[in-house]
Image (tube, helix red, strand yellow):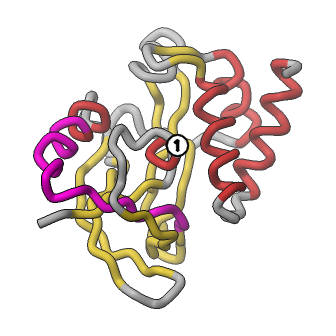
Amino acid sequence: MSFWVFGYGSLLWNPGFTPTQSVKARLHGYHRSFCMLSIHHRGTETDPGLVLALDAVPSGQCTGVALQVAATEQDSVLTALRERELISSAYIEQHVDLETDAGDVISALAYVIDPDHPQYCQFELERQAQMIARAAGGRGPNTEYLYNTAAHLTQLGIKDSDMDWLVKRVRALTAT
């Protein structure tokens, strides 16, 4: 039996597996936010970057993509996702219900921020831009994460005004 994973950030452009199916879907009660300090993948402990997380907001909504994992790959994909996403225990692995544009409901695995974890943060957009512009970690520069995610959201027709602002501001800060 296969399962689904909700992609809302880097899983949109680098899921680490080839989905058997992908469909645009919404998660209610959360929003996409640069609310997690990245001390491994896109920053360091001394100079953290920021990565996206699903932050619980009662009236929130996050549009992303439900990615179906092949039944024959479910164990290896789950292991790889856990190694990648649970590296510092800032994310909590949860099963969530996603709603597709067609009105179907898909139960999917999602990685949600733990608001009690030390890596959880809430910064104004300007501070986010300053951090993203300078940080780099084991998977590369934080700017790459921002630009790739923003580009894929645009390709999917998903509007995110904070993301658009951050891209413009970070490009201005880095002159790229």
Q: Nearer the viewer, residue 105 or 88?
A: 105
User: Where is the N terminus found, in terms of image quarters?
Assistant: bottom left
**Could you say where residue 148 lies in the image, as x and y percent from the top left?**
63, 38
Label 1: which secondary element:
loop
**Could you say where residue 37 lies in the image, as x and y percent from the top left?**
47, 30
Q: Nearer the viewer, residue 117 or 38?
A: 38
User: Where is the C terminus found, in terms of image quarters?
Assistant: top right
Q: Is residue 104 visible?
A: yes
Q: How many marks?
A: 1
Q: Is residue 115 visible?
A: no
Q: Quadrant of residue 120?
A: top left
Please give the range of residues in magenta. Answer: 62-80
Q: Quadrant of residue 157?
A: bottom right
Q: Assess whether residue 70 is covered by the magenta stretch.
A: yes
- Would you say 146 lies left or right of 72 here? right
- Would you say 6 lies left or right of 3 here? right
Specify few, some or many for label 1: CA neighbours under 10 Å numbering under 14, 14-19, or 20 or more.
some
Q: Which residue is denoted by mark 1 in the rendering?
A: 13
Query: What residue lies at 43% left-to-right and 22% top-to-bottom?
Result: 41
State whether residue 33 is above or below residue 135.
below
Query: What residue lies at 48% left-to-right and 9% top-to-bottom?
Result: 46
State whether residue 94 is above or below residue 146.
below
Q: Quadrant of residue 7?
A: bottom left
Q: Assess whether residue 56 is covered by the magenta stretch.
A: no
State whether residue 111 is above or below residue 175.
below
Query: What residue lies at 70% left-to-right and 48% top-to-bottom?
Result: 163
- Identity of the amino acid at label 1? Trp
**Could you say where residue 92 lies in the image, as x and y percent from the top left?**
26, 49
State whether residue 42 is above or below residue 113.
above
